[in-house]
């Protein structure tokens, strides 16, 4: 029965509205290719229809292994429009990690960009339950995997208007895998409602409107592009797709006036700053940048704002749809010295208006810490953009939600004005270039080496990536492994960004009960941070 005063929330509604209201406005730019909202909408409908005709059932999962090209954006609408859930996979993962995600998510279809096909080919026989594979032939016409070309697949669908299939706004729209605090990836379930609200939060806090153009430097596979895959459409703005992040290309597009907004991990900002040191850049229009990942250094923020860009720090995790809080700027800070302004901008701030709740508590008592800027506690969150849970992992979900809050695992302080600032991590996750790395996972790989007796992996400062893994190893008696040997061993087993960049051999500090004291190793590495970063 229809209800006069209720409609299930879904970000699919944004595209449906735009196709009717602004059908001729550019929705997507990719090189010389431009799709209007009418054209983009019709392509989405064909994708949804083609999936139906290929056998997609309601609730089925569809995996995409694809960079920031139009098909990846179309998948965020076409897959849920067919009644399925999108599984967008990190293109930097190893073959075994990707195979695990495809199988664990129960994906029925797999779409693969032809450049990434070599990663999939070695594990094709391990993929269970797939009904079909589709080649996204972006760089060439080659079809390295069995199955049709993407454009051919779309041609098999219909452009007839399909009703949005959402009956319950809490249905799953996507599953995003994160390493979390253990080696095995966990599938974070997003709902139509959560995606809708978080997308609106992104639009509001980034000050986007229909005059905006958003450059895709943030991977769409990462928290569904922090929900900007839907948010840009909600703003009636234009998506500018970018297959590969290259500072020269980024500034070329900016210089042409095609970019007003972008999101970037500190590593992307650092690359842009290196470009600025050798090239003069003038902004033809205001440029708004959201950054997150490892907290950006005040120096990075200061350098980007020196050309007139506005940089805003946001904070979150995969489990909260990407950003949950923002360093909301206040006018009284405008006249502060540039170094002090940059220091404030590096804080994680206050909750999004659509998120509502975030605080810092003593993990043992769940009592809020004083707002003194000194007392450490764990960041916990509640609200509309907290995940529905981990797919097929109820125990992990219950642990993450203990006490009625989502536990971030990040240690922080609260300043007297209520702004949160991360100081350390409760767990030993390393955030390198915006990617989470589980030290436990890396340690487990290194432990497989026959010459390793004990190992501890911690973060160490890096001028490019913010922080990278470093492994401290105690070899077995009578063995003498080399750093190169250990690094190559890891490269064969895990994604390259997870491989330790440095290896040090020797005794490991331990407690009286024999537990390795990783914090001592980490503290030692970070004690000389300024020297390492500058040198």
Image: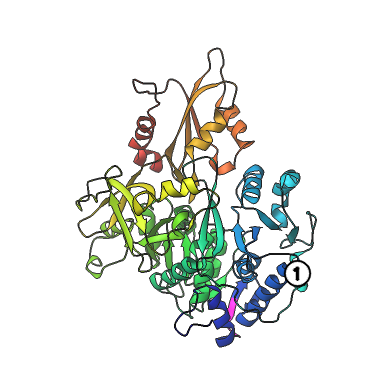
**Quarter of the figure with the N terminus:** bottom right
Residue in the foreground of this view, choosing between 253 and 433: 433
Q: How is the image coloured?
A: rainbow
| Residue occupied by mark 1 | 53
**Quarter of the figure with the C terminus:** top left
The answer to whether residue 143 is above or below residue 495 is below
Q: Kindly indicate the quadrant of the structure image that contains residue 382.
A: bottom left
Measured from the top left, where is residue 407 in percent x and y?
A: 38, 49
Measured from the top left, where is residue 217 in percent x and y?
A: 53, 61
Residue 445 visible in rendering: yes
Measured from the top left, where is residue 74 in percent x and y?
A: 63, 69
* Side of 366 where 91 appears, left or right: right
Residue at the (50%, 75%) spot, across then down: 8
Residue in the foreground of this view, choosing between 437 and 500: 437
Residue 24 within the segment the image draws in magenta: yes
Measured from the top left, where is residue 93 in percent x and y?
A: 60, 47
For label 1, the crowd category at 10 Å Cα-Cα, with few meaning under 14, some 14 to 19 and many 20 or more, is few
Residue at the (47%, 72%) spot, across then down: 260
Residue at the (51%, 46%) spot, across then down: 179
Q: Main secondary structure of the magenta part?
A: loop
Callout 1: helix, strand or loop? helix
For the image, the number of numbered tags is 1
Q: Kindly indicate the quadrant of the structure image that contains residue 444.
A: top right
Residue that lies at the very extreme toward the bottom in this rendered image: 21
Residue in the foreground of this view, choosing between 304 and 109: 109
* Side of 136 where 310 appears, left or right: left
Residue that lies at the very extreme toward the front in this rendered image: 1
* Side of 55 where 175 appears, left or right: left
The answer to whether residue 419 is above or below residue 399 is below
Residue numbers of the magenta segment:
23-27
Residue at the (51%, 64%) spot, across then down: 191
């Amino acid at each position: 029965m229809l209800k006069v005063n209720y409609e299930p929330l879904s970000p699919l509604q944004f595209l449906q509205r735009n196709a009717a209201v602004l059908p001729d406005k550019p929705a997507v730019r990719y090189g010389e290719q431009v799709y209007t909202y009418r054209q983009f909408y019709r392509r989405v409908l064909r994708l949804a229809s083609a999936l139906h005709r290929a056998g997609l059932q309601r609730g089925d999962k569809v995996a995409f292994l694809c960079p920031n090209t139009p098909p990846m954006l179309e998948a965020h609408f076409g897959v849920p429009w067919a009644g399925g859930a999108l599984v967008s996979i990190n293109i930097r993962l190893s073959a075994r990690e990707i195979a695990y995600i495809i199988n664990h998510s129960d994906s029925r279809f797999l779409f693969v960009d032809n450049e990434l096909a070599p990663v999939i080919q070695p594990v094709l026989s391990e993929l269970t339950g797939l009904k079909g594979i589709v080649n996204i032939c972006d760089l060439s016409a080659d079809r390295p995997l069995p199955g049709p070309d993407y454009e051919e697949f779309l041609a098999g669908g219909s452009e007839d208007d399909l009703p949005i299939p959402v009956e319950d706004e809490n249905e799953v729209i996507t599953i995003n895998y994160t390493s979390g605090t253990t080696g095995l990836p966990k599938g974070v379930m997003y709902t139509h409602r959560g995606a809708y609200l978080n997308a609106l939060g992104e639009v509001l806090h980034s000050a986007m409107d229909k005059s905006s153009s958003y450059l895709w430097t943030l991977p769409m596979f990462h928290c569904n592009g922090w929900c900007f895959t839907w948010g840009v459409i909600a703003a009636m703005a234009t998506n500018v797709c970018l297959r590969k992040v290259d500072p020269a290309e980024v500034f070329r597009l900016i210089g042409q006036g095609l970019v007003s907004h972008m999101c970037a991990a500190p590593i992307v900002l650092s690359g842009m700053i290196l470009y600025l040191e050798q090239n003069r850049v003038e902004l033809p229009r205001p440029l708004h940048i959201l950054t997150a990942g490892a907290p950006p250094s005040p120096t990075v923020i200061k350098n980007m704002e020196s050309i007139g860009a506005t940089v805003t720090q946001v904070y979150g995790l995969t489990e909260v749809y990407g950003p949950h809080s923002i360093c909301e700027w206040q006018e009284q800070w405008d006249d502060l010295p540039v170094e002090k302004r940059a220091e404030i901008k590096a804080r994680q701030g206050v909750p999004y208006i659509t998120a509502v709740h975030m605080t810092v508590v003593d993990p043992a008592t769940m009592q809020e810490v004083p707002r003194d800027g000194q007392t450490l506690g764990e960041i916990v969150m509640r609200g509309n953009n907290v995940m529905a849970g981990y797919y097929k992992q109820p125990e992990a979900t219950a642990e993450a939600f203990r006490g009625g809050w989502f536990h971030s695992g990040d240690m922080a302080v609260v300043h007297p004005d209520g702004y949160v600032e991360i100081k350390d991590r409760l767990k030993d996750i390393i955030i390198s270039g915006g990617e989470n790395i589980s030290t436990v996972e890396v340690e487990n790989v290194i432990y497989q080496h026959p010459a390793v007796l004990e190992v501890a992996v911690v973060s160490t400062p890096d001028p490019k990536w913010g922080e990278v893994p470093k492994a401290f190893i105690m070899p077995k008696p009578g063995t003498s492994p080399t750093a190169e040997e250990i690094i190559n061993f890891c490269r064969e087993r895990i994604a390259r960004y997870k491989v330790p960049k440095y290896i040090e051999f020797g005794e490991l500090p331990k407690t009286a009960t024999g537990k390795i004291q990783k914090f001592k190793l980490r503290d030692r590495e970070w004690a000389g941070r300024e020297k390492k970063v500058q040198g």
